[in-house]
Image: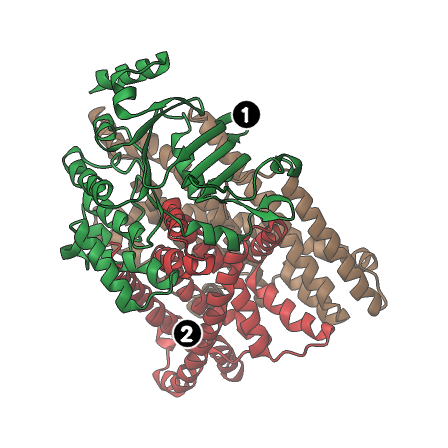
Chain colours: A brown, B red, C green
Amino acid sequence: MDLREPIDHRVAGRASLALYLQVRIFSKLGKDHGMSYFEFIAKYGDRILSGTLVSMMLTILAAILAIAIAVAAGLMRMSPNPLVRGIATLYIEIFRGTSLLVQLYWIFFVLPLFGITLEKFTAGFIAVGMNLGAYGSEVVRGAILSVPRGQWEAALALNMSSGKRMLRVILPQALLIMLPPWGNLLIELLKGTALVALIAVADLTFQAKQINATTYLSAQSFGTALIVYYIVARFVITPSMRWLEGYMKRKMGRA
Amino acid sequence: MTLLNWRWDFTWEILPRLLLATGKTLIAAGLGYAIAIVLGLVLALAQRTPYRALTMIVREIVEFIRSTPLVLQVFFVFYVAPQFGVRLSPWMAGMIAIGLHYASYLSEVYRGGLDSVPKGQWEAAISLNLSTSRTYFRVIVPQALPPSFAGMGNYLVGIFKDTPILSVIGVAELMHAANSVGAETYRFLEPYTLVGIIFLGISLPAAGGFRVFESWMRRKLGMS
Amino acid sequence: MTTEDLLTFPLALQGDHVPMVSFRQVSKSYGSLTVLDSLDLDVAEGEMVTIIGPSGSGKTTVLRMLMTLETIDGGVIYIDGRPLTHMPKGIGLVAANSRHLRKMRSNIGMCFQHFNLFPHMTALENCMEGPVNVLGLSKKEARERSEQLLAMVGMVDKRHQHPSCLSGGQQQRVAIARALAMRPKVMLFDEVTSALDPEVIGEVTNVIRKLVAEHNLTMLMVTHQMGFAKDISDRVCFFYGGRIEEQGTPEELFGNPKRERTQQFLRAVKEAV
């Protein structure tokens, strides 16, 4: 996805057209089952809304965890100490080499055997955050490496400590480079949270599944959830990341 | 340390069952990828036609599929198709959903590859009077593929890692087998850990192999 | 341009001396920027015409229009008497369909500033691509024809090399052979030496000299090399602001330019060297 493409009225127009068509299709389908789409929303809107809020909470918490892990693991990957580097590499390879679902089940079902019992909501966002953190660490590393060599040398020439060099000179520039790929990662993260429904966290996907199980209105329940995810991804996450990018650019005098 | 809870006899007992299921996982990934590779190219080429309406609709479909969760799409295909009178087996529904999902990803990879072919190549093809289809298949696509290999390799590994999601509609792949073992024996440590190891043991060498293949292919096409 | 306007153009040019290339009131603009302003230009069969002028004067657009890489906003181009991007329908001309375009395009070959060889094919495969897939020659015929042309441009030894293994001058010579393999009636050279290192320019200009001397091809060339243009052209056109400011034989135009803009341009070029 090109995150730089500005959202303009055409995108909004297209989205509302898509929404309208969906609503029309669903209302037609719904009538076959004796319920219009509006009646469906009136009846189950609360549950969909509460599921959406849970999904958003999961996304925010997982994102904070993922960013923290990504920065830590990304920096560790570049450490001169082979042990530190090794630990980070092991972590990244394990979390990128297996599935999020496997990781989620492992954290939820196996960790208790080691005496670590997590509440399902916590297990959910930790699994998603750790998984995306591994992917994010590569983005962080790539961005840091792409800061021009001359910047390192200039900071060194000012006799800054290595910590200061990183914090004051390199990271702020790397941040700007890594924002667009982070936009994509956050959408992946949002999608990843849907899997926590499988350990019965009452998120949007879980609610859709429950509504489907009691009403058999599959198109309405799953379709509505899909649209909500789409709206959050395309009209909340993407624009806010773009806003953040613009803000950072202005702040760094690169507008 | 409770790690000593690990039971080797149990491990050996369930391993054949898990390996058999691994075979099914690989088949699912392979079939899904085959669908995605072809459908992805269709989605990418459909966005290059002169018909703006078609381009816009396909673009929006790709965006929609890419920004919504695969697990919901799997549910949607499996449960909604019967509402339209099409009864799909879990395997069929799973292949359609995962194939479509990754087709939208691959279409973006192809799009990037196609866009990376310099404009001069199109002009040279016109100056030699090559037809549009010949220009695509003799000139443009061969050059668009090598830059796409990295992304294609990533998504092959990605589709393999996403097959556990198909267990939610009862596709009997690796995750499904591990779940069954857990449900029957109430032991989760061995099956879920083994699943993790099997995934790691396949996806890491595959990712490495793809990198080797990519550089070999580039050399072979004389583009290094 | 409306259909009525097109009615004023003949369906085909007839007579004893039909020019190989004929621009009739051809216009082109990008938005408010006029690139070509009602251009009239005839090129006779076998004639070598060189186009010079400052950048942005529309000279490259002339070649790109002939190769149908650019659309025409107004006017008609005739190749060997037949309209290039239009076709007769009823009593007038309409925009050509793709079949007509492909038929007309077969008359024209082009060499580009950046060669545009296909990087995944060897020199020989580049030359054979068109003859096999467009002209329908057998592989054997196409190979013979291509090797002959590669020998003419002095590249037969390197015929199995990929473009990435060739120097710029060598790539451009292969590109010339590739274009000639289609047996065009008109050859277009668009700044073919501009992207080359100075020491290899000669090997490309020598090939073009040879073409002029030994073949009766109609050629249009855009170049910044005044000396070369002076040597081999039958006629030189100086473009300025989308129209021909002045044209004549190389002796007339370079030796005794009449228009002030031409004099200025030639002076500036001379000073730059």
Characterize the local packing of mark 1: few (<14), some (14-19) or many (20 or more) Cα atoms within 10 angstroms: few
Is A154 displayed left or right of C82 in the figure?
Answer: left
- Residue A99's spot in the image, x, y percent? 44, 65
- Residue C136's spot in the image, x, y percent? 37, 65
- Three-letter code for the amino acid on which mark 2 is drawn: Val
Q: Foreground residue, B183 or A29? A: A29
- Residue under disc 2 on the same chain as residue under disc 1: no
Question: Where B6 falls versus A186 (above or below)?
Answer: below
What secondary structure is found at the residue carrying circle 1?
loop
Chain at numbered mark 1: C
Distance of label 2 from label 1 (alpha carbons): 65 Å
Question: Where B29 falls versus B183 (above or below)?
Answer: above
Residue that extends furthest to the top in the rendered view of this protein? C260
Q: Residue at x 39, y 75 (%)?
A: B194
Q: Which residue is mark 1?
A: C32
Q: Residue at x 16, y 37 (%)?
A: C202
Chain at numbered mark 2: B
Q: Which residue is mark 2?
A: B195
What secondary structure is found at the residue carrying circle 2?
helix
Characterize the local packing of mark 2: few (<14), some (14-19) or many (20 or more) Cα atoms within 10 angstroms: many
